[in-house]
Image: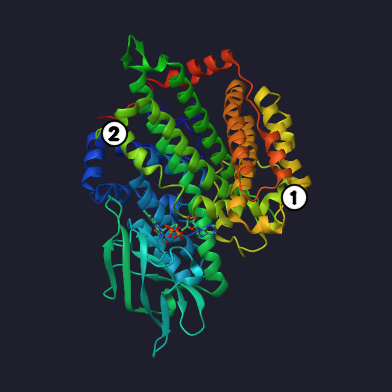
Amino acid sequence: MILLDPNKHDRHYPDERSREVMLKTISFFERRGKRKLKEDDHAAVWYGEFLDFVRAERIFATLCTPSGYGAADARWDTWRICEFAEILGFYGLQYWYTWQVSVLGLGPIWMSDNEALKRKTARLLEEGAIFAFGLSEKAHGADLYSTEMALDAAPGGGFVANGRKYYIGNGNRAALVSTFGKIAGTGEYCFFAAESQHANYRCVQNVVHSQNFVSEYELRDYPVREEDLLSRGDEAWNAALNTVNIGKFNLGWASIGICTHALYEAIHHAAHRKLYGMHVTDFPHAKALFTDAYARLVAMKLVALRAADYMRSANAEDRRYLLYNPVVKMKVTTQGEDVINHLWDVIAAKGFEKDTYFEMAARDIRGLPKLEGTVHVNIALIVKFMANYFFQPAELPAIPRRDDACNDDFLFHQGATRGLGRIRFHDFAPVFARFDLPNVRVFREQIDALKALLAHATPDAAQTRDIDFLLAVGELFTLVVYAQLLLENAEIYELDRGLVDQIFDVLVRDFSRFAVQLHGKPSTSAAQADHCLQMIRRPAADAARSERIWLEHVHALRDAYAMNP
Ligand SMILES: Cc1cc2nc3c(=O)[nH]c(=O)nc-3n(C[C@H](O)[C@H](O)[C@H](O)COP(=O)(O)OP(=O)(O)OC[C@H]3O[C@@H](n4cnc5c(N)ncnc54)[C@H](O)[C@@H]3O)c2cc1C
């Protein structure tokens, strides 16, 4: 089964320690149980017990220390990081968040040339420390150009930092807070490591009411010694963006974990609830909503897994991950919202109950598309790749499934963030051609219609500056990339072909919906609107296929998993 099932953990790992990390994490949450999970959530208590467990079992040390800096079992391995993020999301986004912002805080450190600080960080990880990423500011959010955190030269050498940061997770306890600032006078960017327990570091407040501590902090004449500096100038800028490249991928995995737990809970409830003498799952619309939710969730997972293969295989010549990564961030997380919406439409009042996991899922799923770059920011990035993707395919190595025990070195040596428009991609068409299925055929016709729009009614200069228009085009393009990654992994994982067709039933409808949106944009020309109409297609309905998928894949989950009370 492709979905995480804590009762049947049989994922392949090349080493025992990786499996141990996952099993111990699952066992930590199951032993504490659902009641305690929900109590802590409602009381918004700091997750100290979880962090005690992480310290005792050296979990972050194993997963978040690149090879060569820590113990023999430590490496930065995206294969196992994916599942760890999924498990944390499965039990609660708050647990994922304290790990996630540690990942972000570690980014500029592992990317830096400051070897002494890297050794210190490895030591701190072994001691169970958490980390933080101080980028956003209250007035300008994540607009790095406007950063106000200022470093002035100190009389005896080094600098003193003054300024505030806002929305910074773990800012109350982080051993090191990777803080982005500007050197006064020159405007040069820099990253430096601040200690949250230092006398000149003031944790002002938690800006949210949650188990998470999303801090506002202030540095007042904070001494930044040469040995605290992580990077300067272009390197600091690159470290900021390249760290987000690594981190934002994990948001897709949090969505997958949340949706999986919510699906188990929802289908169990619906399948055992009787109304008017029938089970809720016998209503045709309930079946359709559950089947769509399941199809979307399987697609989310296959796409995110496939994108991880490209991340792990990236190098200076092969940067395809720079497209696939924002696709996971933007698309998997918004698909997560769709999954929860479908499930909630079925389980209705149950989804509000205080004792359910679903209550947290319904709240948390909405954060993921918005954080670490909104949907808009990511689509604006994605469209930069569109021309090369459609019209300049290149011969590039075929990437296998990457579940090997290797350290993902390149992620911390990604280099300059420029030149996105020059990145080339392999031809997407052959994998579509290998799936001779009714809905894949319809989807290919939709792609052809999109390509025809781009080739024959090419967006003009004004349209390429109009983000509102570009976002609508970007949704269609993203769907093609998403479908390509999905099919590549459907092959690797030998997914039931009927399920692939069922997933494409959803994708065909989504394509039509986005085509209608582009059709309605004020700046869409008449010729472009005609092309949009060509993209609107009906999926190839097949009652027997849908019924089989429902029975064998979806309804079959009704008693598969319930969290230990
Ligand atoms: C719970 C939580 C935890 C967080 N944790 C951290 C953390 O640990 N560290 C940290 O540094 N930050 C953190 N953040 C900040 C988070 O990364 C930002 O909230 C996020 O990047 C979005 O910025 P914003 O909310 O300020 O939106 P704004 O920047 O105010 O954006 C406003 C609107 O403009 C659009 N927009 C902005 N720029 C562009 C663009 N270039 N192209 C197209 N549209 C654009 C946006 O899509 C949005 O619709 C956290 C935020 C929250 C709520």
Residue 31 sits in quarter? top left
Q: Residue 472: where, in percent of width, then height?
A: 60, 46
How crowded pointer 2 is (Cα within 10 Å; few <14, some 14-19, many 20+) is rated as some
Q: Residue at x 53, y 43 (%)?
A: 331
Label 1 residue SS: loop
Residue 483 seen in the current view: yes
Residue located beneath label 1 in the image: 458
Residue located beneath label 2 in the image: 352
Q: Which callout, 1 or 2, points at the residue further toward the start of the chain? A: 2
Residue 3's disc number: none
The amino acid at mark 2 is: Phe
104 is higher (above) or lower (below) than 92: below
> How far is the residue under mark 1 from the one under mark 2?
47 Å
Residue 444 sits in quarter? top right
345 is higher (above) or lower (below) than 388: above
| Residues at discs 1 and 2 in contact (Cβ within 8 Å) | no
Q: Quadrant of the C terminus?
A: top left
28 or 470, which lies in front?
Answer: 470
Label 2 residue SS: helix
Question: Which mark is in front, 1 or 2?
Answer: 1
Identify the residue at the far top of this view: 277
Q: Residue 188: where, in percent of width, then height?
A: 52, 78
